[in-house]
Amino acid sequence: MSNKNSQSAALKPEPALVKQSLRVWLKMLKATKHVEAIVRENLRVEFDTTLPRFDVMAALYRFEDGLKMSELSSALRVSNGNVTGIIERLVSDGAVLRVPVAGDKRAMLVRLTQRGRDEFARMAAAHEIWINEIFGSLPSDVSAELLATLDTIEHAQGLHNGEEHDA
Amino acid sequence: MSNKNSQSAALKPEPALVKQSLRVWLKMLKATKHVEAIVRENLRVEFDTTLPRFDVMAALYRFEDGLKMSELSSALRVSNGNVTGIIERLVSDGAVLRVPVAGDKRAMLVRLTQRGRDEFARMAAAHEIWINEIFGSLPSDVSAELLATLDTIEHAQGLHNGEEHDA
DNA sequence: CAAAATAATTTCAAGCTTGAAATTTCAAGC
DNA sequence: GCTTGAAATTTCAAGCTTGAAATTATTTTG
């Protein structure tokens, strides 16, 4: 199994470093949950919506021509059935439209209605402000290093079977 | 409202910096979800359990004398009703015990059974290894800087009402 | 072309999560 | 001793999430 990192299970890493890894991970989790909670709360109070809905709308906003359900679920990295439910609610709220795909009766194209686009544009503007209130005070060299470190983490291994990556 | 940061909504921040904030946040979210997914999957495959159960057990492991439901939910920063359900399942699995609190018929003390402690000890050991496989390759100065940056983020404001902090 | 494999989606059961409402118990104040 | 308010917990409805099974449509292949 993968052994290319300087610390892998087989190499008996320093206990102190293991503890440091754990500390970093727990802090990262805590900080992320903190920000997420703020975003959720703000979305709820100011727009009466949820983070999953926001995420779906963000993806559809970006792909103006719409996405198939399967594309949507793989873009968001959530399960198929999950997307079905969220889209169902967005459709009944009039924010999303389902369009059959010409030539494939199985597939469905999903896209924002004009109302959905307008709604998302307002939410996205507010969202940028919230995020900037939290991250905006980081000096740009610090945030650059953070970005780089997160990138390393995102591409680190860890699954005990095989694991796939995206581009 | 708070205006002590170099970037707040009222100050019309540089668009480029706003975008950078957003980039950092999205990357942070993605990296965290990546690690979380690995932990979830490993917990599921190797121990047939879930992350919320693991989190509850971790808290109870640390407080050997047990915690009240309210203490548990505030330690984990999740809602009361949430903890009720998870504890219910852990009790029926024999990992957790509910003990009435002497002198207060409302409160319940919750603590791990011996079996729960043993089970958690095994899971925690594996968990440390998984985390180390991901974070262990970060040079210690990088992880120190990461820790510090995350700390800054965790204490940044962002809620549009008042917001509370812990020690 | 029929059969078998593959693909796109939905359905389903189980569990997680929240905020709000309901319950039960405790603590003061009168 | 009541009554009122606060505290600890559970219940509840709604929504999110997953992995697996089921459904329907397409494609491949014998």
Image (tube, coloured by chain):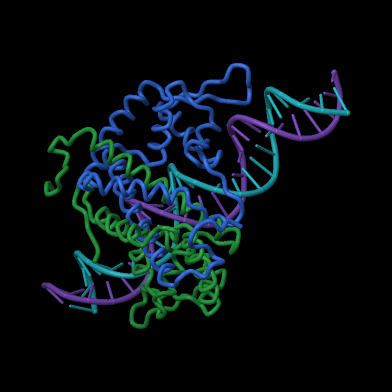
Chain colours: A blue, B green, C purple, D cyan
In the rendered image, residue D2, in percent from the top left (x then y), is placed at 23, 72
Relative height, residue A105 to residue A8 (above, below): above
- Which of the pair C6/A45 is nearer the observer? C6
Would you place residue B79 above or below residue A113 in this image? below
In the rendered view, tell whether residue D15 sits above or below residue A108.
below
Q: Position of residue B139 (x, y in %)?
A: 38, 59
The quadrant in which the C terminus of chain B is found is bottom left
- Residue displayed at 21% across by 47% down: A139
Please name whichever residue, B8 or D24, is drawn nearer the observer in this view of the structure: B8
Quarter of the rendering containing residue A22: bottom left
Q: Quadrant of residue A92?
A: top left
As drawn, is A162 to the left or to the right of B136? right
Residue lying at 36% horizontally and 62% vertically, measured from the top left: B140
Q: Is residue B69 left or right of residue C4?
A: left
Residue A122 sits in quarter:
top left
Q: Is residue A115 left or right of residue D26?
A: left
Left or right placement of residue B149 versus residue A21 in this view: left
Question: Whole-percent x and y of residue A165?
Answer: 53, 43
Q: Residue at x 53, y 80 (%)?
A: B114
**Direction top: furthest residue:** A102
So how many labels did they put on this image?
0
